[in-house]
Amino acid sequence: MSQTAFSAGVKPGGLTSETEIKILLCYLLASVGRPLSQGQLEEALAGKELVNCFELAHALQALCRQGHIQQQDELYHITPSGVNLSEMLATDVPVSVRETALSAVLHLERLSRQSLHNQSEIKAEEHGYLVRCRIVDKAGPPVFQLEVYLPDLASAQLAQKKFIENGDAVYLLTLAGLTGQKDLAAAYLQGPGPQE
């Protein structure tokens, strides 16, 4: 079989070698330490134009056949041989690709966890879109709710995405504005201090 992967949708510097894609997948599963779905891997890797979706799916199937990963309940788990493959060959994949891929996967996992608490939905209205946002706790009513009207779907989708990412900040800044506690807003806007 050819070691050259289909490269449509892959930016320069992305992976076009079937072997490199397999190594990267093992590296990600070993580094994250949790099972991932094909959708998560596609969104992270194809979303960053690091690999082609078709080649990613093909590599996952090949890794399962070779015993380096296993699929259970739509999730891919790394096996000991996959961990060994990652440890021995990870340096065959460029550092920039590994770092970008790992950062993208971790970002998606963080968003997935945040979306359990920071929820948002879009409702089409006659002349635009209503974005309903809420922060929920494990039990009880929502801690925070907000509705905002936007004129087009792209703006509504962006607002929805940003609320899921930054709902806690929206809540804090709204609370600061409503209560007049400017120190809450100032603390958020200043951000963390310099790293030592």
Image: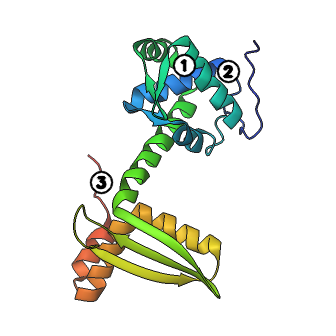
- Work out how far the residue at label 2 is from the one at label 1, CA to CA, in angstroms: 14 Å
x, y percentage for residue 130?
A: 53, 81
Binning the other alpha carbons within 10 Å of mark 3 as few (below 14), some (14 to 19) or many (20 upward) gives: few
Q: Which residue is mark 2?
A: 18
Seen at 50% across and 68% down, the residue is 160
Side of 187 where 120 appears, left or right: right
Which residue is at the front of the view, 24 or 153?
A: 153
Side of 1 where 75 appears, left or right: left
Point out the image quarter for the N terminus: top right
Mark 2 or 1: in front is 1
Q: Which residue is mark 3?
A: 194
- The image shows residue 100, relative to residue 182, as above or below, that is above
- The image shows residue 177, relative to residue 154, as above or below, that is below
Mark 3 lies on a secondary structure that is loop
Of labels 2 and 1, earlier in sequence is: 2
Binning the other alpha carbons within 10 Å of mark 1 as few (below 14), some (14 to 19) or many (20 upward) gives: some
Badge number at residue 88? none
- The image shows residue 115, relative to residue 105, as above or below, that is below
> Do the residues under discs 1 and 3 have CB atoms within 8 angstroms?
no
Mark 1 lies on a secondary structure that is helix
x, y percentage for residue 155?
A: 60, 74
Mark 1 or 3: in front is 1
> Do the residues under discs 2 and 1 have CB atoms within 8 angstroms?
no
The amino acid on which the numbered mark 3 sits, given as a three-letter code, is: Pro
The amino acid on which the numbered mark 1 sits, given as a three-letter code, is: Cys
Of labels 2 and 3, earlier in sequence is: 2
Seen at 64% across and 78% down, the residue is 152
Q: Which residue is mark 1?
A: 64
The amino acid on which the numbered mark 2 sits, given as a three-letter code, is: Glu
Look at the image and tell me whether residue 90 can be seen.
yes
- Work out how far the residue at label 2 is from the one at label 3, CA to CA, in angstroms: 42 Å
Of labels 1 and 3, earlier in sequence is: 1
